[in-house]
């Protein structure tokens, strides 16, 4: 049994973490924390908890969290996690940070995209990017896990086999992603207000979303060279889910069967990536409240175009489910424990 704390338990990813962790057979939740000096009852925050759950929400106190935890999940806004991650790391805790604070290895790049100085640059080298399908062996020993962003998870899993196997032209990658509103977190804003979102559908941060450097760093790893993407995120008027449509051009001599074979081969042992038959495509409803990433591919002998569509739940495979998958790997458990 490992002792687990969630800092930021009142936010969307924090709530999802508690939902998953309280059903995990090898976990004892020891503290759930908030900044509030007068914490609400946890049932007010998470009404779906089972009876007699024994959990309470507490005001954050570093010493208590350190004393009571083997692993600490940080479900805080980006720029708010780095100092705390450092304190916990120095005290020997395993830290799984859901924010972007340790995802980008280049501190200057982080500062450009997130508008804040990185105060714990020395830790960037120790952080392992928490995409199990790429970094599983490093995650087994990681003390600081930088859990990936939600858009990056859907995009990177959709692109990995195509780039690693050089099946497509690296110069022409267009990613069109759509996310449910929970992707923006719980805080109120005009952009995510019900009256703004309901009945609408629009692009935002066109080709300037803060997840782009994180994606491009991994694409370089997959392809062995610098790869840029055109990226258009959209806000869907639904609660949760991400669907990414990725437009690619086939490399010379590549057949649709070769593409499908590469995807099937890449993910055959991956418990949470499902590749659909050629010409069939996932939908958000297929993956909501699960840790699956579903992938569908369109390719035809008569056309150079290849279209890859991936779907995830932004709060599960895009955040808290993936974080628990990383915890399972780190502590030597079956990777699927507590997850569906
Ligand atoms: N939402 C997603 O789909 C998603 C996916 C992947 C990654 N992430 C990342 O995961 C992290 C958490 O996201 P989230 O969606 O759970 O955010 P959220 O709903 O806004 O929750 C964040 C929580 O952090 C606490 N907090 C502590 N310091 C804060 C501060 N200075 N300002 C605001 N809140 C503060 C708040 O709890 P108290 O007020 O109770 O202290 C709040 O409930 C973010 O870094 C986000 O980028 C989110």
Image: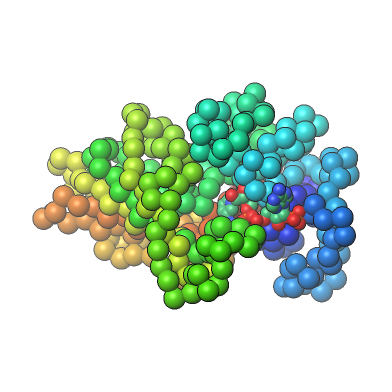
As drawn, 261 above or below 338: above
The quarter holding residue 81 reads: top right
Spot occupied by residue 200 in the image (x, y as percentages of width and height): 42, 71
Image-based side of 147 in relation to 244, left or right:
right
Specify whether residue 278 is in view.
yes
Q: Is residue 117 above or below residue 247?
A: above
The residue at the point 29 percent across, 45 percent down is: 173
- Location of residue 310 (image quadrant): bottom left
Residue found farthest to the top = 122
State the residue lying farthest toward the left: 302
Give the residue displayed 67% in from the left and 29% down from the top: 119
Q: Is residue 246 left or right of residue 25?
A: left
Describe residue 269's horizontal placement relative to residue 21 as left or right: left
Looking at the image, which residue is at 53% across and 48% down? 149
Observer-nearest of 107 and 312: 107
Compare residues 234 and 251 and report the one nearer the observer. Answer: 234
- Please say if 70 is above or below 184: above
**Residue at horizontal 72%, vertical 35%?**
83
Residue extending farthest front: 190
């Amino acid at each position: 049994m490992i002792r687990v704390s969630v800092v930021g338990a009142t936010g969307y990813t924090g709530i999802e973490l508690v939902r998953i962790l309280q059903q995990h057979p090898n976990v004892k939740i020891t503290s759930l924390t908030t900044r509030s000096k007068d914490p609400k009852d946890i049932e007010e925050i998470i009404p779906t908890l089972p009876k007699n759950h024994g959990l309470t929400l507490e005001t954050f106190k570093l010493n208590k969290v350190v004393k009571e935890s083997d692993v600490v999940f940080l479900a805080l806004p980006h720029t708010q996690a780095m100092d705390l991650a450092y304190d916990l790391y120095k005290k020997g805790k395993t830290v799984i940070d859901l924010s972007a604070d340790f995802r980008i290895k280049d501190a200057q790049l982080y500062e450009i995209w997130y508008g804040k100085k990185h105060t714990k640059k020395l830790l960037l080298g120790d952080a392992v990017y928490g995409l199990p399908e790429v970094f599983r062996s490093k995650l087994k020993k990681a003390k600081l896990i930088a859990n990936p962003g939600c858009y990056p998870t859907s995009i990177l899993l959709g692109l990995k086999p195509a780039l690693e196997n050089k099946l497509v032209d690296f110069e022409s990658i267009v990613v069109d992603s759509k996310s449910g509103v929970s992707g923006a977190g719980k805080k109120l804003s005009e952009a995510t207000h019900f009256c703004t979102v309901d009945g609408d559908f629009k692009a935002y941060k066109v080709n300037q979303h803060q997840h782009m450097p994180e994606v491009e760093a991994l694409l370089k790893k997959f392809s062995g060279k610098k790869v840029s993407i055109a990226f258009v995120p959209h806000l869907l008027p639904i609660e949760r889910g991400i669907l990414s449509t990725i437009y690619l051009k086939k490399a010379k001599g590549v057949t649709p069967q070769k593409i499908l074979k590469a995807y099937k081969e890449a993910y055959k042992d991956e418990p949470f990536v499902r590749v659909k038959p050629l010409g069939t495509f996932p939908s958000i409803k297929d993956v909501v409240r699960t840790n699956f990433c579903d992938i569908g591919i369109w390719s035809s002998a008569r056309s150079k175009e290849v279209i890859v569509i991936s779907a995830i739940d932004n709060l599960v495979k895009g955040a808290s489910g993936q974080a628990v998958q990383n915890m399972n790997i780190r502590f030597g458990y079956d990777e699927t424990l507590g997850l569906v």
